[in-house]
Amino acid sequence: MLQGLEKECELIGLSPNTDNIKDAKRQFRKRSVAMLPEKHPSVANAHSRFHELNTAFIKILERFRESGERISDVMPGQINVNKLQYMIPLRAGTASFWRKAIKLTYPSVIIGGQKQQNNLANFSQNINSRGIRHVVFWKLGIETGSQPLKVNLIVYDNDILQVTGSSFYLWVLECFQQLSRLAEQLQNQSPTDHEEECCEDRGGMGCSSVDNYKKILEHLQNIEEDIEDLNEKVDELSVAQSDHRKQTDSDNSTTQNRLNVISIKVLEIRQLVGSNAMAKGEAPYRSTK
């Protein structure tokens, strides 16, 4: 499946024979968390190593796409690895709802100044669109008690999300789908002019049952997607616990082996001391009193 990408697979910690995109996603998350540059400030090549890791993952994803796999969930937009930047097209008309979703999800978010989309001509024709920057500190679900990671989320009026920062890809994998669903829910809950008129005509009883039925279906679909995300996180936790258990067992075994070696050495020393004392005609152990 991934033949010819042995080097990239080695960086990710993945077998070239794998045909499961979820395994690639899981391994990339694991390696990314371990190799984040902010975790290794004293390592001179930390950023270049992290760049290589992200580049390797993108090549692996492209191979999956060539084989017919759907990769939009793990690669929903365009990536500039050199700039640690993700550009993601959002659902039409959801920019304002995305900003609300970010504020709801991250209450401590820092709202930055307005930003002009003046360097993204290749991504969108509307290069003069206004964007609002959100500085977010977030935590990985599998990293309980860990230091928060920083990411910048810039939501442009023309429905484009720009994600930057060293943890940009981790945030997209972990949080993008969840916030996307929340933004859509906020949009659906916000009445349009037609819906307001409809509600007024019906004396506030709501719009057609067809519209309500569609909303119920969308809600059920969101629940299914949330359950799938939870199942993936449970799998990751199980793998992490298994790895931790193996490491703990290995450490305990090493410690016990060292104690056994020390005990043998102590016994040998005692025997040598006793033999030496007997050779001199002394008692092996003499009281000091």
Image: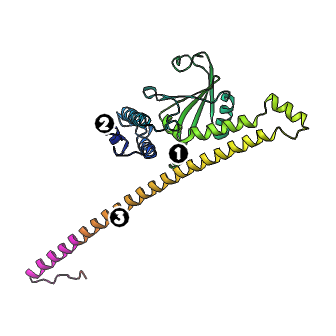
Query: Can you say whether 161 is above or below 121 in the image?
Result: below
Residue 178 located left or right of residue 258: right
Asked whether 261 or 199 is in front, the reply is: 199
**Which numbered tag is attached to residue 140?**
1
Amino acid type of the residue that numbered disc 1 sits on in the rendered structure = Leu
Magenta part of the chain: 264-286
Q: Position of residue 213 (x, y in %)?
A: 75, 43
| Residue 269 included in the magenta stretch of the image | yes
**Which numbered tag is attached to residue 87?**
none
Q: Residue at x 61, y 48 (%)?
A: 224
Amino acid type of the residue that numbered disc 2 sits on in the rendered structure = Gly
Residue 119 located left or right of residue 98: left
Choose the circle earlier in sequence order: 2 or 3.
2
Eye-nearest disc, 1 or 3: 1
| Residue 110 included in the magenta stretch of the image | no
The quadrant of the picture occupied by the N terminus is top left
Asked whether 219 or 81 is in front, the reply is: 219
Q: Residue at x 43, y 39 (%)?
A: 36
Q: Position of residue 193 (x, y in %)?
A: 81, 28
Q: Which residue is mark 2?
A: 4
Amino acid type of the residue that numbered disc 3 sits on in the rendered structure = Asn
Q: Is residue 139 among the parts visible in the rendering?
A: yes
Kind of element beneath mark 2: loop
Q: Is residue 144 among the parts visible in the rendering?
A: no
Asked whether 126 or 267 is in front, the reply is: 126
Kind of element beneath mark 3: helix
Q: Which residue is mark 3?
A: 252
Displayed quadrant of residue 99:
top right
